[in-house]
Amino acid sequence: MFNQTCEYAVRAAIAIARHEAGQYVLARELSRELDLPHQYLAKILQQLAKARILESSRGRLGGFRLARGAAKTRLLDIVAPFEDLRRTDQCVMGQKVCSDATACPMHDFWAAVRKRYHDELEGKTLADFVNFENSRRPA
């Protein structure tokens, strides 16, 4: 569903959220942990910092950390810099105008899917993902 860059951004943000709150995580450490190309991941992390999802710090104790904490960082916040969410508002059948008055055969179905998709992006936080992962770990 997400493009590769967006997927990596989500995976990296979840990995950062798993660390102790406020702790900086090095891009190289994340790249090893997630098995992602270091340079590519570093650029993604910089984009998340530019979008104010992450904070970055240079130096020996530097790296990246969440700007607002896991419970306040929505999936939407992470996805938005990498995905054109306006595309989901377009008609899936390619009509220039697709509204209730000029509906295509997929209009009602797509409206429901689009609403659910946006609701999930807005409603899920990084804390939800971390809690989900923790609940699936064997005791």
Image (spheres, rainbow, N blue to C red):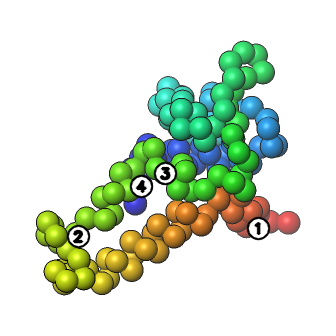
- The reply, left or right, for residue 64 in relation to residue 1 is right
Q: Gap in Å between the C-alphas at discs 2 and 4?
A: 17 Å
Check if mark 2's residue and mark 1's residue have beta carbons within 8 Å: no
Query: In x, y percent, where is residue 17?
Result: 71, 47
Of badges 1 and 3, nearer the viewer stands 3
Q: Nearer the viewer, residue 12 or 104?
A: 104
Q: Gap in Å between the C-alphas at discs 4 and 3?
A: 8 Å
Q: Residue at x 19, y 83 (%)?
A: 101
Q: Amino acid at mark 3?
A: Val
Q: Residue at x 48, y 51 (%)?
A: 79
Check if mark 1's residue and mark 4's residue have beta carbons within 8 Å: no
Check if mark 4's residue and mark 3's residue have beta carbons within 8 Å: yes
| Label 1 vs 3, first from the N-terminus | 3
| Label 2 vs 1, first from the N-terminus | 2
Name the element at disc 1.
helix
Checking the image for residue 92, the label placed there is 2
| Label 4 vs 3, first from the N-terminus | 4
Name the element at disc 4.
loop
Checking the image for residue 79, the label placed there is 3
Checking the image for residue 135, the label placed there is 1
Query: In x, y percent, where is residue 53?
Result: 60, 41
Query: In x, y percent, where is residue 13?
Result: 62, 45
In the displayed structure, would residue 40 be above or below residue 18? above
| Label 2 vs 4, first from the N-terminus | 4
Residue placed under numbered mark 4 in the picture:
2
Of badges 1 and 4, nearer the viewer stands 4
Residue positioned most to the front: 101
Of badges 4 and 3, nearer the viewer stands 3
Q: Residues within 10 Å of mark 4 (few under 14, many from 20)?
A: few
- The reply, left or right, for residue 116 in relation to residue 61 is left
Name the quadrant of the C terminus: bottom right
